[in-house]
Image (cartoon, grey):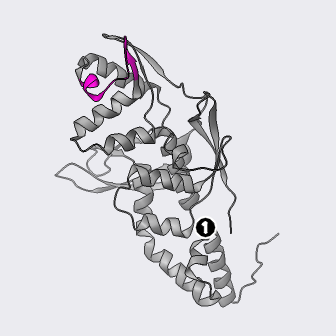
Amino acid sequence: MIEPAREVALARGLIDETGARHRRVLLRPLNGWQEWSLAAAPDRIGAAEVHALLASCIERLGGYSEIDTSHTAALSRGDRARLALELRSLLFEDRLPLTQRCPNPDCRELADLDLFVSQLLGEPGAPEPEWFDVATEDGPARVRPPTGLDEEISMALPAPPEQQAALLWSRITGAVGDQRGLTAEDWLALRPATRQAIAMALADGEAAPDLTFLSRCPACAGWLELEINPFDLLTRELRRGADRLLAEVHCIAFHYSWSEDTILALPRSRRWRYLELLRDQIEGRPLNEGWG
């Protein structure tokens, strides 16, 4: 029932307590139950759900073979986006067709944009530095990319978005001058130029997929700006295919008398292969057509 896992190289990877990096991931495709769960999820799944999803799909992460949410929550924002795009390509192949409505009120036409996951991901290259050093007006500073845990803790703060953002920046800023262990209040007390320099250092150094795009509207030639959230994209595409998933379960259960649990435990490629065999049998084609 298990499909071969795909090997994925992370840009930053998991950095353990010894400082060793774990960058190689064996990623399994989603099974039917995971597809159905995401299809039924709200428009934006939370950080904890993202960590659980990734943990359920990772067969191995570097030297770790038993993966739980503590491992996936420790991954950087860029690495989690990379894994989400890889999961998407395992389901829907490399091409990523998108549609965006023109923001020009006198136009409002729909524009099509074709992307490819392989181009978005590129090659991870050399390991991303653990910390980025930056000179600021308040002294030398260090910043690192946010992990899933950083985002989960900051988003859970019952406070306005500005306070949540301040908590996130305080967690990922290791030092500013002689100051260590910043709080959200410490971050807000920094000079604006210092905060900007730290943010620019992170933006320039982080090896995350570039998921913001500019394109021309084919109708009015106005600029279209599009930003992709890979997990939102995956959820939205699976939601559109939920009726098809039900039809697949119905067809396979009707002909094979398998339970829903058994069918949904299959990855999509295996379900579709059984459906192809059923079609060939019903249409009188050889069941081994094209086999070597």
Report helix, strand or loop for mark 1.
loop
Residue located at (59% from left, 83% from top):
259
> Quarter of the image containing the C terminus?
bottom right
Task: Place residue 260 in its image quadrant.
Answer: bottom right
Residue located at (62% from left, 89% from top):
255
User: In the displayed structure, would residue 39 be above or below residue 28?
Assistant: below
User: In the displayed structure, would residue 132 be above or below residue 42?
Assistant: above
> Quarter of the image containing the N terminus?
bottom right
How many numbered circles does the render carry? Answer: 1
Between 251 and 167, the residue placed more toward the observer is: 167
Left or right of 100, for residue 21: right
Amino acid type at mark 1: Pro
The reply to whether the magenta stretch includes residue 249 is no
Q: Residue 111, image x and y in percent? A: 34, 54
The reply to whether the magenta stretch includes residue 177 is yes
- Kindly tell me whether residue 19 is visible in this rendering: yes
Left or right of 93, for residue 39: left
Q: Which residue is mark 1?
A: 267
Q: Residue 243, image x and y in percent? A: 44, 76
Q: Residue 94, image x and y in percent? A: 56, 54
In this view, the residue farthest toward the left is 106
Residue located at (41% from left, 15% from top):
134
Between 289 and 168, the residue placed more toward the observer is: 168
Which segment did they paint magenta?
Answer: 174-188
Between 239 and 73, the residue placed more toward the observer is: 73
Left or right of 140, for residue 19: right
User: In the displayed structure, would residue 240 be above or below residue 161?
Assistant: below
Q: Residue 22, image x and y in percent? A: 63, 36
